[in-house]
Image (tube, rainbow, N blue to C red):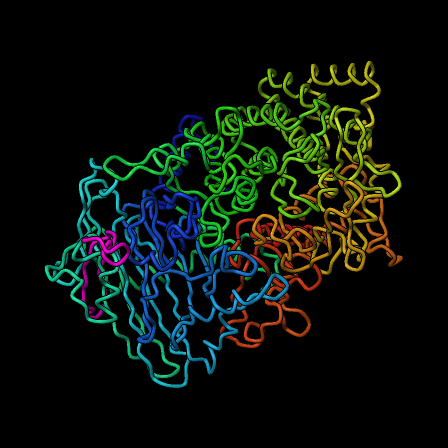
Amino acid sequence: MPRATSGGSTSTRGKQVELARREMQEWRRWGPYVSERAWGTVREDYSDDGDAWSSVPHDHARSRAYRWSEDGLGGICDDRQLLCLAFAFWNGRDPILKERIFGLTGHQGNHGEDAKEYWWYLDSTPTHSWMRWRYVYPQAPFPYTDLIAENARRDRRAGEYELLDTGAFDEDRYWDITVDYAKAAPDDLCLRVQVRNAGPDPATLHVLPTLWFRNRWSWDPEVHKPAIHEDDGLLVAEDAALGTMTLQASGAPEPLFCENETNTLRLWSHPGPAYPKDGINDHVLTGAPTVNPERRGTKAALWYRLEVAAGDTAEVRLRLAPERRDLGRSWSTTLRARAREADAFYASLAPAATPEEALVMRQAFAGMLWSKQFYNYDVERWLDGDPGQPPPPVSRKTGRNAGWRHLYNQDIVSMPDKWEYPWYAAWDLAFHCVTLSHVDPEFAKQQLRLITREWYMNPNGQLPAYEWNFGDVNPPVHALAALAVFQLDGSRDREWLQRVFHKLLLGFTWWANVKDPQGDHLFGGGFLGMDNVGPFDRSAPLPDDLVLEQADGTGWMALYCLSMLEISLVLAEQDCAYEDVAIKFFEHFTLIAKAINDRGLWDEADGFYYDAVRRPSDNTSWQVRVRSMTGLIPLCAIAVSDAHQTSRLTEFSTRVDEFLKFRPEYAAAVELGDEDHATMLALVGSDRLPRVLQRLADEAEFLSPHGLRSVSAVYRRNPYQFWHAGQVAANVDYEPAESTTNLFGGNSNWRGPIWFPVNYLVIGALERFASRLGDEFTVEFPRGSGHHCTLAQIVTDLEQRLVSIFLPDADGRRPVFGDQPRFHEDPAWRDTLFFHEYFHGDTGSGLGASHQTGWTGLVADMVIRLSRQREEEGRT
């Protein structure tokens, strides 16, 4: 980030910064804030049984006005989602217009919900002044029925049946569609739609840029119904809250108008509007009289019929602005200028990256920036119902999210992705913010503050997890993220850090009071984001009043402690009152460290941490001896002090010395510094570190060619068996790909694949260990190789392994693409990347949600770090 220029008063510089911030916010007013899926979400579910997937299925989506949000293809909207613009396509053979991404519901997929289309976010600047989106659409009928039927036939042990497997792209008979977006001004957007006929024969594609208002008037009597009308080929959208916006288009498309209101006749055989939401769909497909001949409504489209020769490309020009603007020279100049600015911006982030690494980084950032979404959910109104509407079922009052009435969301929020996870998830968001800080620290800071605001955070201090169950518990990584964002932003915004710190204090207190059931500093928490990592559902109560004490839950809390300690020390530099809080977190950390190492979670024989089941009545316990990522989380709880910093905090330093003198039994977690070494606080001390690293560095256990596995590969041939009441109650196999268990719906797997967020945390911990232990500390890496590496070298190696998932290997094949030939061999496909939820533990093939740039976007952070390391090496 640029620093303020010298000269001028502090107040003047402050005003300049504030003006720059406001200008940035104006440029963010319009962005890619439209979801890819609003159907099948909790918000839209008003059913008796709470089955969101069935309440508003894909078949309803074209006909049903959504209550809370909108969806579309390549969609953009304003930051209140008053007005949306997206695209519809028709190949002349499908039974419906292609207006949204199709995929299988959680019930239909043999591995849970799964999008069954191919689209990419190729570029975006932080303010969305320049964006690029790409979509490929078969010229043959879209195989909706085939995808549903074949995936239903397969069980969990079979692979997923994908769109390419259907033959829909055989002979290259598809449309390759790219849309570029460039802003001439904050509210002046120039769009270029390029449609390439990839097939061997001439073909016709119907393209319908669609403008519509989110339906607010049906639910809120105080909202004046807006309207869109035609004026000499221009679509004019007028709304009391938004003002006027116009959509201008090249050529002579036919304007079509309907209402963004539910087709009650189609769905429920009740009389409804003459020109309902699916009126344009029905008119284009069958010529039905379902569009308003008066050319007025709340939804409108411009209907192009593009006849394109084989291999040729057709172009459509659009401009969304307050009034009619040029589609010629100024339109072209804007696109060229914004594209150049984006190139220069990204070139400056990682100048020492290879061209392939730079491509990975740029598309990762693009996916993260495109995955912002207008998230609208007033839980109280959802629970009680809208005025004038049928009341929700009585069961809702005590059902899902009933304890979160205070939660009111109406914001632009960073999503894991906008199809499979079109809702925020608390711990995902923390990782998003770390990566986003490289390109937009203001937005990252705003997101962390937002998730801790009083209309998000529960009054008891708990952060909302995700809309399926806001009361679920996610790992408390937000203090770690806040510290990272503060540092990446130049360590200067102390006011923001204070605001977030105070709210995180409430969150820490909630954890300490609720998730330490025995009061012995060993924490639970349930699945903690790692779904099926254990032999049983860790969120479900154990029989016979048994208590599960979790190595990861305890490790997460220790990490929370240390992150809060580090933040308080930063703030204490200018306000000594924070020294008191720093002392509190120092002492609390030592209590957790003693508990995890002395009360049965550390196994001396194995040199590893395990969960334990404890019987409170007699205080007996036994370990759940699964070597998994839960046992590596304690490794992440490490902090290394800045001796210069702590030496100036006399009260803190004095109290630490006194505590260690009078409570020596807690001193094992503290390795004091000297002239050559800083002080280190860690759950895993330097004496136990080599034992844990033996497991981490073993290719027969955690170390894979592409990062760290979530479960040891030792269970490949010898599954772990959990015994209870004299019999095997559950197993854990090494499953490097999709899950074969239905725990948590079976749509994600922590029994072997590679996950970026936990890899990122382990790498960060090893960096901190390296700063304390130096190059004298080495580890055989990989284990059994005879090659010893410093911890700094291991950090680089792990980052390279993770980045390699997306890079071409010696044969030009990117591991992320698995065994799909088209992605490896077709020049039109091989450089457009997917950022999956997780990756095959042996091959690096992408698995789970295909667009979860969210935390997999951490690969961009790793590319930047590798680039900076090369720059440092070049200087020395």
Question: Which residue is located at x 34 percent, y 38 percent?
Answer: 392
262 magenta-colored = yes
Q: Residue 106: percent from the left, percent from the top?
A: 50, 55
Q: Is residue 73 left or right of residue 260?
A: right
Q: Residue 176: percent from the left, percent from the top?
A: 41, 72
Write down the quadrant of residue 619 in the picture. top right
Q: Is residue 55 left or right of residue 328?
A: right
Write down the quadrant of residue 130 in the picture. bottom left
Q: Is residue 360 left or right of residue 246?
A: right
The correct choice, above or below, for 23 with respect to 209 in the image is: above
Instruction: Point out the stretch of residues depicted in magenta.
Output: 247-272
Decide which of 114, 538 is in the foreground and name it. Answer: 538
Q: Residue 549: percent from the left, percent from the top?
A: 72, 33
Work out which residue is located at the far left of the displayed protein and give it: 294
Q: Residue 683: percent from the left, percent from the top?
A: 76, 33
Decide which of 238, 484 is in the foreground and name it. Answer: 238
Q: Is residue 32 visible?
A: no
Q: How many marks?
A: 0
Question: Which residue is located at x 57 percent, y 58 percent?
Answer: 111
Work out which residue is located at the far bottom of the displayed protein and give it: 201
Write down the quadrant of residue 836 in the picture. bottom right
The correct choice, above or below, for 161 with respect to 470 in the image is: below
Work out which residue is located at the far front of the displayed protein and give it: 726
Decide which of 226, 180 is in the foreground and name it. Answer: 226
Question: Which residue is located at x 46 percent, y 37 percent?
Answer: 400
Q: Is residue 664 visible?
A: yes
677 magenta-colored = no
